[in-house]
Amino acid sequence: MSSADPSPGGDRGAGTNQSVERAVSVLRALDSGRAELRVSDIADLTGLGSSTTSRLLATLERLDLVERDPVSNLYRLSLGTLPLAATAVNRHPVHRAARTVLQDLAARTGLGANVAVRRGDVLMFLCNFEGARAPKSHSQAGHTAPLHATGIGKCLLAALSPKERRRLLTEPLEAHTEFTTVSHDMLDEEIVAVRRSGYAVEAEERALGRASLAAPVRDASGAIVAAVSLWGPMSVLGTAVGDEARGALAREVVEAADAVSQALGAG
């Protein structure tokens, strides 16, 4: 079959399969924030026709990747997706290196502890632990967050040059609160500070009342491949906290990031 021939399932183009792409778009629509969706909702989110969406949902339901509520007839992701997701995250080298370190960090400080990697223009959390002083977290494994509005994201952006950051993130940067960094010039200054101090500080940039400290994780080559953060209420991590107490927490997060880096082979 030549590259100009339709590929199986009526697909066109070398290296692509339209049926697979459409099925994945349906699965991603079901991860768009709402717990359950109608066929028409999924069709709107994916741009597919209602009949195509219905056929894809029927196939995915047979494969135990989606399920339909017996009362409302609304669709949601099935627990059949869980083994795939668990395998992916548990086999990721950063997750393996960070899990115990973060668990201990959260228990020791009483704060939330995260590890994340960059996925394109967002960060993705690989695992999260909550201490007694951390509010209930929505930073579950697999969830994404903006790079410019989080301490952990700024550590990840420190791996890029100013020119690369500008290509990656369109200015003005999205404002999540009145305190969010919205210009690349300001972001450049913050990343210089990250490189100088070894950690990032974020106060209410993504959510009011919350702050974080983060530090980069490096692999055997010395490249930044992930970042670790401590997060919690402003009363514990905010700018009003004494320098000594905040400095002690900054050392905790830097040491945790160093431990993960060493497990990944960094010198």
Image (cartoon, rainbow, N blue to C red):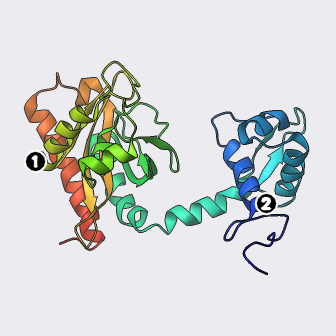
Horizontal side of 96 relative to 18 (left or right) equals left
Outermost residue toward the front? 4
Horizontal side of 250 relative to 36 (left or right) equals left
User: Which residue sits at x=27%, y=33%?
Assistant: 202
Residue 265 coordinates in the image, percent (x, y) = 26, 74
Amino acid type, callout 1: Arg
User: Which residue sits at x=83%, y=34%?
Assistant: 40
Who is closer to the viewer here, 166 or 34?
A: 166
Q: Which mark is residue 19?
A: 2
232 w.r.t. 262: above or below: above
Q: Mark 2 or mark 1: which is in front? A: 2
Outermost residue toward the left? 244
Dot 1 corresponds to which residue?
A: 196
Q: Is residue 125 visible?
A: yes
SS category of the residue bearing label 2: helix
User: Which residue sits at x=28%, y=68%?
Assistant: 219
